[in-house]
Image (cartoon, helix red, strand yellow):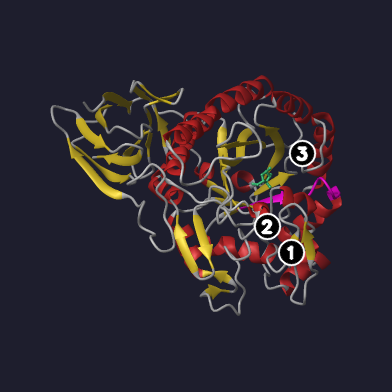
Amino acid sequence: ATPVTQVTVDTTKPGAPISRQIFGQFAEHLGTGVYGGIWVGKDSPIPNTRGIRNDVVAALKAIKVPNVRWPGGCFADEYHWEKGIGKGPRPVTLNSNWGGVIEPNTFGTDEYMDFLSQIGAASYVSANVGSSTPRETAEWLEYMTSEKETSLAMARRENGHPAPYAVNFLGIGNESWGCGGNMTPEHYADEYRAFSTYAKNYNPEQTGDKRMMKIASGANVDDYNWTETVMKDTQGKEIDGLSLHFYSGFENWPPYQPASGFDETEYAKVIKTALRMDELVTKHSAIMDKYDPQKKVALVVDEWGAWLKNEPGTNPGFLFQQNSQRDAVLAAVTINIFTRHADRVRMANIAQMINVLQAMILTDGDKMVLTPTYHVFKMYVPWQDATFLPVTYDAGTYSHGGVTLPRADIAAAKAKDGKVYVSITNIDPTQPLEVDLDALGLKAKSASGQTLTAPKIDSINTFDKPNTVVPKAISATAEGGKLVLKLAPESVTVVSLD
Ligand code: AHR
């Protein structure tokens, strides 16, 4: 018999606001994430606007990307912004982290800002701490944000942008415990304070709520000592966020799980790794609470997602992987975890936006395909700046191959459009799930929305078959005060209540 779970959403007890910034993206100079994925150049036969591909811009606008973290990643701590500006030929450098390939520097600060304005996203710039000085960051900010007639601001004008840019978020270093300089947390905290001192935003419009947020490089997975030390040593020193990086999909390095062509055991193992996000966020938040009980500093999970085996035949340094219905489930349960910690987790960036790791979009020349993860982000658009609502349910468990998981993951929110949205992920890939839904404080008569299902446990979308995993309409009418939804195995469903 189909398992049945009773779900109660309490609309009378709204919780924290769910920042739209948790739906942020990450675009590193890595593989074809930027070159090919975003930038094709003005002379490309691929339709583009000032070198930025139009199909990708249209797809990203549809998911209302709130911010894009750039230029890295590990790349950021070797990046020198001056090499990526100007109308003349730009220096050609090496991308030593990712495949040792040539970095043409044709996509630089002005192209990034143009891309953001085309998709309507905020900027999240990662500054080079590992191999540079506070001066380089200070000058980059002057170039981007000054309205005065300094040489750097004049250079920006000559490069086509008279008005200052908005730098909304500034990351001070990336993985400073690793590729960003192999620092101790004590040393990094000293660097943070020095960089932060000189990291000034001159844009006259960026005051009050619009001021630039400074984000410190945070812990790797469960390095709680990093969080403890950096929080302790940066108090009162202009810190608005502390990052956390956690990739799921593998138990031991290097990542080995195939992105498609896997069985149920591999499905269950990967989802289990992703659910660890809740424990990590809970424990890092508890440490932050000690130093910042008022929760002024956000926990910024600015790298998350499944890191799987690269596709056979591709450059391992390019981190190119397919994206299946399993990734859709993984994305939904992770987003739900963030919403449950919305008071502290106020920003997150999935890694990465295009052609790298758990991507929204895959491209190959002029071809483009939207992944199952993309569809989850689209279904969750109403959750941007919504308000968390508590949900109670007990769906039991699903077990396979020695791994036990919750059978379902359910979250709710009241959106800015005034409607209550419920997201239900049926984690069990073998059985459908019946949900009997009740909303306290709301006499809902019907539910409607979309459900993302797949014919096979590892279904993917390809350039030839782009519509294998796409959302379908779902609706239900209340019976006896309850809404009954029948959901497919391994599915993600988001409905609004009317
Ligand atoms: O997202 C790929 C890499 O993973 C990033 O460059 C780095 O920050 C992390 O280790």
Quadrant of the snapshot with the C terminus: top left
Give the CA separation, mark 1 to mark 3.
22 Å
Residue 125 included in the magenta stretch of the image: yes
Q: What amino acid type is highlighted by mark number 3?
A: Gly
CB under 8 Å between discs 2 and 1: yes
Q: What amino acid type is highlighted by mark number 2?
A: His
Q: Nearer the viewer, residue 49 or 414?
A: 49
Q: Which element carries disc 2, helix, strand or loop?
A: loop
In the rendered structure, the answer to whether residue 389 lies left or right of residue 282 reads left
In the picture of the structure, the residue carrying the numbered disc 2 is: 29
Q: Which element carries disc 3, helix, strand or loop?
A: loop
In the picture of the structure, the residue carrying the numbered disc 1 is: 103
Mark 1 neighbour class, 10 Å CA radius: few under 14, some 14 to 19, many 20 or more: some
Can you say whether 375 is above or below 290 in the image?
below
In the rendered structure, the answer to whether residue 149 lies left or right of residue 497 reads right
Give the CA separation, mark 2 to mark 1.
8 Å
Residue 434 included in the magenta stretch of the image: no
Q: Is residue 200 visible to the viewer in this orientation of the structure?
A: no
The reply to whether the residue tagged 3 has its Cβ within 8 angstroms of ligand 1 is yes
In the rendered structure, the answer to whether residue 498 lies left or right of residue 294 reads left
